[in-house]
Amino acid sequence: MPIDNETGDDGGLRNRRKLYGRRKGKPLRASQERLMAEVLPSLKVNLGDTEARPGALEPAEIFGRLPAQFWLEIGFGGGEHLAHQAIENPDVGIVGCEPFVNGIAMLLSRLEREEIGNVRVHPSDARDLIDRLPDGALDKAFLLYPDPWPKARHHRRRFMNPENLRPLARAMRAGAELRLATDIPDYMEHALEAVGQCSGLLELAAPVATGRDNAWLDWPGTRYEAKAIRAGRVPQYATFRRV
């Protein structure tokens, strides 16, 4: 499979598979441009030296305090789930990773409007952040309706592959959860196979749940999920546990 040359936050080129598509959709409104210019800098995670060893970026450094728990959302879309969890769990520090500019602007709007203070944003590839986290730092991680990359030749671009799951598992404490939601049956099958290749690191914590009524009790849903249901696709939910 071809490898993408991707420009990182440090301006350098990294040779690795790209996990996401476009970075920007329709032009931002003036209010959104203001949020990106004025609000994002104060919430953006500073990765510092990108060559530093794992463990160099402590949760207390990210949030300015040590949160009761540290959660990570990989690709937060419009931020509905991230904002909901932050409101419901004010003692938890949550970092959302999302390269799509329009989604970031949507999240920033809600964070400002509802004065949500326990969220930080990494506006790029989640792997950059994961690589910098200490061993066992994460208490929970979310991967909700990721890009399915449906073509077989693109399956290596899916996040749910061992080369991405192993570093994530390193950054998760024993017993921590990784939640996955998708409306693509093939993606769930692929994810289960990938986790199976990470024996001793991750395991399926409960049978895969099917249908919106069987989602997690604290699940608010997302606009993508609603769109999928209207289109006749059935959501699936899996919870994996760090061994």
Image: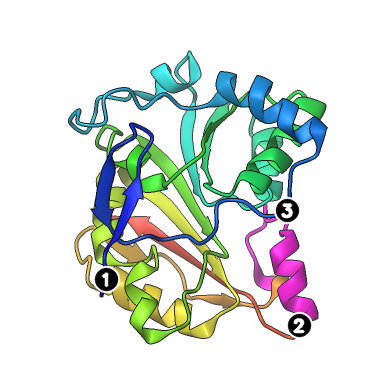
Is residue 91 rendered magenta in the image?
A: no
Name the quarter where the C terminus is drawn: bottom left
Q: Report which quarter residue 221 is drawn in.
A: bottom right
Assess whether mark 3 and mark 1 are in contact (beta carbons under 8 angstroms).
no
- Kindly identify which numbered label has been placed on residue 193: none
Q: Nearer the viewer, mark 3 or mark 2?
A: 3
Task: Give the residue drawn at x 31%, y 67%.
Answer: 161
Q: Is residue 109 left or right of residue 208?
A: right
Assess whether mark 2 and mark 3 are in contact (beta carbons under 8 angstroms).
no
Q: Is residue 168 left or right of residue 141?
A: left
Task: Give the residue drawn at x 26%, y 71%.
Answer: 2
Q: Report which quarter residue 35 is drawn in.
A: top right
Distance from the alpha carbon under mark 3 to that under mark 2: 23 Å
Distance from the alpha carbon under mark 1 to that under mark 3: 28 Å
Whether residue 40 is visible here, answered yes or no, is yes
Amino acid under disc 2: Ala
Q: Nearer the viewer, residue 147 or 208?
A: 147
- Kindly identify which numbered label has been placed on residue 231: 2
Amino acid under disc 3: Lys
> Where does the image place residue 124, in percent across and percent down from the top left?
46, 43
Q: Secondary structure at mark 2?
A: loop
Q: Nearer the viewer, mark 1 or mark 2?
A: 1
Q: Disc 1 marks which residue? A: 2
Q: Secondary structure at mark 3?
A: loop
| Residue span colored magenta | 214-230
Amino acid under disc 1: Pro
Name the quarter where the N terminus is drawn: bottom left
Task: Give the residue drawn at x 39%, y 68%.
Answer: 158
- Kindly identify which numbered label has been placed on residue 26: 3
Task: Give the residue drawn at x 38%, y 34%.
Answer: 9
State which tag comes first along the sequence, 1 or 3: 1
State which tag comes first along the sequence, 3 or 2: 3
